[in-house]
Amino acid sequence: MKDNYFLGIYWEARNDSVELCVNMLYETFVFLDECDDSFHFWYTTQRPKKGQVIEPINLSKEGIKDLLIKGQNFNDDGTLNSDLGYLVYLKSSKDFSKAHVISITCGNVSKLLKNSVTLNMYNSKDHPNLNNNKFLEKIYLRLVEIWRPANGIIRHNNNNLLAKVYN
């Protein structure tokens, strides 16, 4: 079994603008990249066509805004459902079996869904920091600072709870 960690932060409906979501996501990517080089590149999770080159996404503010706009939700009739905000789902490696996975829902004002940032961290011997509870807590606390969630959790894939924090 892979040795993975899960970090999740959650908050209720909050009308965050696309600009605010861009800034928070940009800060998240800058911070994660500073933490470990395994967070340097991110890729969309869509399966490429055979022979298509897989390139990392553009992590500039403009690139992130494009991602968020593409991650908007639409009703069955094709009209925009702006109540559901923006959704981004990315992996950190071309080899999806050894990738971190980040999912962000931001700007959602529906009472049916929560806003969230979840990060499934693939741990390997090449990235020993990702097996250090103090390091994981540092990531958690910075993401809480950036996103201002209502609550969150860090746990190991064997269901050992490392931290459950409520603000």
Image: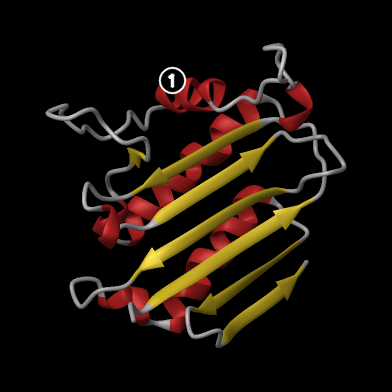
Q: Position of residue 80 (x, y in %)?
A: 70, 15
* In this rendering, position of residue 61 left or right of residue 92: right
Q: Secondary structure at mark 1?
A: helix
- Which quadrant: the N terminus? bottom left
Please give the name of the residue rendered at 22% of the width and 46% of the height, measured from the top-left corner.
Answer: 94
In the image, residue 156 above or below residue 47: below
> How packed is label 1: few (under 14 Cα within 10 Å), some, or many (20 or more)?
few
Type of amino acid under label 1: Glu
Percent position of residue 85, x then y: 69, 30
Residue 157: image x %, image y %?
Answer: 47, 79
State left or right for residue 16 relative to residue 104.
Answer: right
| Residue 63 found in image quarter | top left
Q: Quadrant of residue 81?
A: top right
Label tally: 1
- As rendered, which of 22 and 55 lies closer to the eye? 55
Q: For mark 1, what is the residue?
A: 62
Looking at the image, what colour scheme do you see? secondary structure
Residue 145, image x, y percentages: 63, 56
Comparing 132 with 125, the one in front is 125
Say whether residue 92 is left or right of residue 17. left
Q: Quadrant of the C terminus?
A: bottom right
Q: Is residue 128 above or below residue 41?
A: below
Question: Of 99 and 149, which appears nearest the observer?
Answer: 99
Q: Tell me what residue is drawn at x 83 percent, y 36 percent.
A: 110
Indicate whether 95 appears above or below 20: below
Q: Residue furthest right?
A: 111
